[in-house]
Amino acid sequence: MGQNLRIPGPTPIPMAVREAQSAPMIDHRGTEFAAMLREITTGIGSLIGTEQADVLLLTGSGSGAMEAAIVNTLSPGDRVLVVTIGAFGDRFAKIASAFGADVTRFEANWGAAADPAALAEHLASAKPYRAVLLTHNETSTGVANPLRELAAAVHAAPGDPLVVVDGISGLGAIEFEMDAWGIDLVVSASQKAWMGSPGIAIAVVGPRAWAAAEAARMPRAYWDFAEARRWAEKGQTPWTPAVSVLFGLQLGVRLLRDEGRERTWARHAAIAAGAQAGLEALGLTLVAAPQDRSHTVTAAWLPDGLEWGPFNAAMRGKGLIVAGGQAAWTGKIMRFGHMGDVGIGEMADAVRVMGETLAEFGHGADAAEADRATREAFEQAMAVAVP
Ligand SMILES: Cc1ncc(COP(=O)(O)O)c(C=O)c1O
């Protein structure tokens, strides 16, 4: 195997996507482009369980879509609750504050998920919020939030605040039912489970978010959802889009539709089970408790006395590219991405190479046994999920 890219995005892109991305340029105001836009947006809508929301494709990274979600639904001074369990929740809070929202933070300790009952309790006793911002899958800690339950807690709160979700590293890979769970707005990005290159941000806007957009007074121009919807009705985008990234995204969405969303979710859950078993077999301690663990990112503590820089360089020398910790957890944890175009072979290989490198650094580990444990946990999980 050449390079094994096991960071939590950008993710490896399948050969079909690479080939599609190198197709000749087309007119972004022509019929071919319109057909492509329609296929991608319809596909994403059905994969995330919405019939009533509009899927908007914006050119930018996921953080751009987070900003767009905020400026299109809120006014300066609006009371906003940000449920943050890590670096990306913190980013949501930072963007909302930058545009003048009155932000309250509802935090869980890093490495844990937010507790729906505690959120419900807070919401019941606080002055009503205009919106609650949530992270579906916190990439910085490898934790998935119980989004369905958190959204239900928000809807039960005084004033029925808007439910705005950063779904960037979960959408397409982890169970998500936009309409059934009452998610008003969710954002994602092409370079995650969608198997595209970086460059397209995805914003899915439901009816209550559209109503909020009409009243929202935060400044916006490039990110204006109403403008994007007006142009989407003609099969176009307001500004020149990342056309080649869209060529690839079209293929990524097709691959996911061909696999079928329940199978995709089961595959990600099973690979996560494999990753967890393999890393534990290497003697590593995982960051998250079993019930909080993400299906797309697994985080483990660096063993005591192991210095991240040289250890990471040694793994990279063997072609294994994993991510380190962010913010306060820099040099303390390592993170494995397993979303999108990934099978258990790549994950088991990553575990084995990590095990061999750990041994070289004096943290004895049985790499072959960990490889076996990874595959076995995967097979068991798949047998239950897809009998
Ligand atoms: C949960 C989450 N939110 C936001 C982002 C930011 O997305 P981008 O880097 O595309 O701006 C990421 C990227 O890793 C993420 O995982």
Image (cartoon, helix red, strand yellow):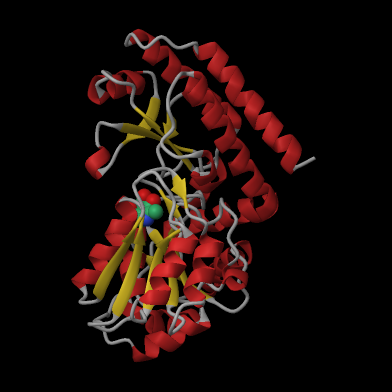
Return the x and y of residue 10 as percentages of the image width and height: 40, 45
Return the x and y of residue 354 as percentages of the image width and height: 42, 20
The reply to whether residue 64 is in sight is: yes
Seen as rendered, the residue at the extreme right is 387
Compared to residue 319, the image places residue 330 above or below, namely below
Q: In screen coordinates, is 320 left or right of 376?
A: left
Q: Residue at x 28, y 59 (%)?
A: 91
Seen as rendered, the residue at the extreme bottom is 215
Compared to residue 302, the image places residue 96 above or below, namely below
Question: Looking at the image, which is closer to me, 185 or 362?
Answer: 362
Question: Looking at the image, which is closer to me, 37 or 23?
Answer: 37
Question: Looking at the image, which is closer to me, 82 or 4?
Answer: 82
How many numbered marks does the figure carry? 0
Return the x and y of residue 21 as percentages of the image width and height: 47, 51
Q: Residue at x 56, y 19 (%)?
A: 371
Question: Looking at the image, which is closer to me, 359 or 148?
Answer: 148
Return the x and y of residue 233 as percentages of the image width and height: 51, 83
Q: Quadrant of ligand 1?
A: bottom left
In the figure, residue 168 lies in which quadrant?
bottom left
Q: In screen coordinates, is 304 left or right of 21?
A: left
The reply to whether residue 340 is in sight is: no
